[in-house]
Amino acid sequence: MKIGIMGVEGSFSEIAGEKYIEDSGITDGELLPLVSAENVLSELEAGNIDKGLFPIENSNGGIVIEAVHAMAEHRFKVERMFEIDVHHMLLVKPGVKASDIKTITSHDQALKQCRMYLKRVWPTMEIEEYADTAKAAKDLAQGVLPSTTAVIASRACAKLYNLDILEESIQDLKFNYTSFVVARAIG
């Protein structure tokens, strides 16, 4: 069973997808990273994946705007909704210190979920939006982003992309839940 997810390897959507597969008792599930909700729903509608999984709302950051826009453009059926507790890490390339950082980047939702932390700890830092939390981590590791960049992403990304965790659980709320939709094609 092919399950398209928003994000790339290491994303919170991948973590949610793994939970969905386990909780549903799916034995042949394959998660396909498709970066955006638009790509997930396009592939679902085209019949290239069996299910799609993407976040729609966070208890702190609110609605995932890009998911809402994609949902308005596609026909699908909601099979299930569930939530996971999301903990954000501030990741850097190995050896990079806080004083080396010039920019912090991540997906708009992650930035919203960490906005008070960013104002409190990094009040003058340049903050940039990125297509995906895990893509930011991957691009930092691969040198696409400068080594003076820190990214907000999952703990899984630190391991996966060999990045150091500068600070743990930087989200503004201790309990930071994101709701995910599992979508299937109509018909």
Image (spheres, grey):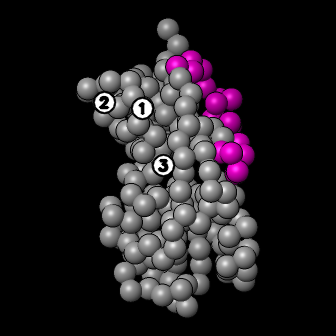
- Counting residues from the N terminus, which is met first, the one under dot 1 or under dot 2? 1
Location of the N terminus by quadrant is top left
Residue 124 placement, left or right of 31: right
Q: Label 2: few (<14), some or many (≥20) within 10 Å?
A: some
- Identify the residue at the far left of this view: 28
Residue drawn at 56 percent across, 18 percent down: 77
Q: Secondary structure at mark 2?
A: loop
User: Which residue is under mark 3?
Assistant: 12
Tally the marks.
3
Are the residues tagged 1 and 2 within 8 Å (C-beta)? yes
Q: Label 3: few (<14), some or many (≥20) within 10 Å?
A: many
Magenta segment range? 58-79
Residue drawn at 38 percent across, 72 percent down: 163
Magenta run includes residue 69: yes
Q: Secondary structure at mark 3?
A: helix
Q: Position of residue 73 (x, y in %)?
A: 65, 29
The circle on residue 29 is: 2
- Counting residues from the N terminus, which is met first, the one under dot 2 or under dot 3? 3
Q: Look at discs 1 and 2 and give the one toward the viewer.
A: 1
Q: Position of residue 175 (x, y in %)?
A: 62, 51
Are the residues tagged 1 and 3 within 8 Å (C-beta)? no
Tell me the kind of residue under disc 1: Tyr
Q: Secondary structure at mark 1?
A: helix
Q: Quadrant of residue 128?
A: bottom right
Tell me the kind of residue under disc 2: Gly
Residue 94 placement, left or right of 11: left
How far is mark 1 from mark 2, CA to CA? 10 Å
Residue drawn at 56 percent across, 37 percent down: 83
The circle on residue 20 is: 1
Q: Position of residue 181 (x, y in %)?
A: 56, 30
Tell me the kind of residue under disc 3: Phe
